[in-house]
Amino acid sequence: MRAVETAVVGAGQAGLVVSGLLSQAGREHVLLDRRATLGGGWQDRWDGFRLVSPNWTTSMPGFPYRGSDPDAFMPRDGIVDHFRAYAAAIAAPVELETDVTRLAAHPGGGAARFRLETSKGPIDAREVIVAGGPFGRPYVPQIAAAIASSIRSLHLHDYRRPEALPPGGVLLVGSGQSGVQLAEELMAAGRDVTMAAGRCGRFPRTYRGRDIFWWLRSLGTRGAAVGTPLPAPENLASPRLRLACNPQLSGHGERHDTNLRAMARAGLRLAGRLESIEGTQVRFAADLAETLTFVDRFFDDRFRRSFDDFAERASETLPADEPAQVDFDPPSITDLDLARERISSVIWTSGFRPATDWIDLPVFDEYGLPITRGGRTDVPGLSFIGTPWLVDMGSANLVGLVRDAEALAADW
């Protein structure tokens, strides 16, 4: 049996930021991570993965981005190396290959409020900070079970590179950030790609001369002071929208907008929302035109006015801008025979769901997300960091992580 003041579960970037702040506050703590190596969930991404946020967003407290191109987009292995170097710089007390299988209230009371059951024995702690991140458990819809065995069906989590797929075309299910990046990669590799598009909006890569993540960070850290904060959970039409896809962006190739119409003009075959699969027969909803209209209007309808208001109220002198639109209406398909079209693979870019069933405490809503105020739950001593929508839409992103962690640290 061990006892610690604070246990941080997860040693990805969220856990490391918290560790650095705990050390600054002189707080005894330990970071527990189930992996054999540091690097968090970035290690699970495919070979050609790149950040969709610029390199400057990887700067952490006391550890700025160390490269030569802050506006480029870091590849997977570079991200892993960056955060390993950060862990070394802050002397993070990480214990790897330590899987936390249960978190519950301490059975005996006293100074320790919690007991963590781990693969290396139990640990008692007065405080616990869950830093598991947004990529908990790959989500694949139940209809995937009906795909013919002749078709390779896999979640994005299990994809590595185009050459690892069987020869033939690819059907991508989902059109969020990962979906558009995979479409670009597979098309560049010479694959015929079909995409079932969902309701994922898109951001321009830059607006008024600044990268979209400059805007997101500005509104997340300075917006509230001038009346233009980022959207918060209470602003959503439904709590379920916290599980929705991230807006389309890409860090592949040269800096560019991701636009489904432009990609379709270049050879991407688009379809509406996937409705059913039976063997090799696939049916899509007849909603492609409506979906593309939603995607095109997303930025203007939900963010542009807030961005402009922020620039004016914060006295940011920036040039006027009119995000480019693409005038191309791709043909819509509603039925597809995968075998006839020589489509050999289906990749589900359908996101992830929370993996919190190891936490035996009443702190979750019906969607499996923690109920918090700025990361703090109603259970004294239990907090979360790096989870989607803790404070606002930036909470699980590099641009909101440090802000949320510093707010937690304010009470230490």
Image (cartoon, rainbow, N blue to C red):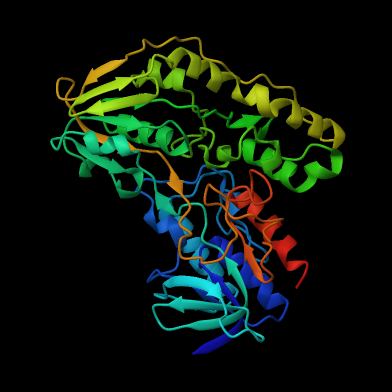
Is residue 232 visible to the viewer in this orientation of the structure?
Answer: no
Q: Residue at x 62, y 65 (%)?
A: 17
Q: Is residue 302 above or below residue 235?
A: above
Q: Is residue 287 above or below residue 366?
A: above
**Is residue 266 left or right of 192 when viewed as pictured?**
right
Q: Is residue 286 above or below residue 171?
A: above
Q: Residue at x 49, y 67 (%)?
A: 84
For this rendering, which residue is in front, 200 or 67?
Answer: 200
For this rendering, which residue is in front, 398 or 230?
Answer: 230
Q: Is residue 80 above or below residue 334?
A: below
**Is residue 324 left or right of 163 when viewed as pictured?**
right
For this rendering, which residue is in front, 273 or 394?
Answer: 273
Farthest residue to the bottom: give it. 1
Residue 80, horizontal then vertical, whole percent: 45, 60
For this rendering, which residue is in front, 316 or 147?
Answer: 147
**Is residue 139 left or right of 69 when viewed as pictured?**
left
**Is residue 288 left or right of 309 when viewed as pictured?**
left
Q: Image quarter for residue 304?
A: top right
Residue 243, horizontal then vertical, whole percent: 52, 42
Residue 255, horizontal then vertical, whole percent: 52, 34
Q: Quadrant of the C terminus?
A: bottom right
Q: Image quarter for residue 155?
A: top left
Q: Residue at x 59, y 55 (%)?
A: 370
Is residue 262 visible to the viewer in this orientation of the structure?
Answer: yes
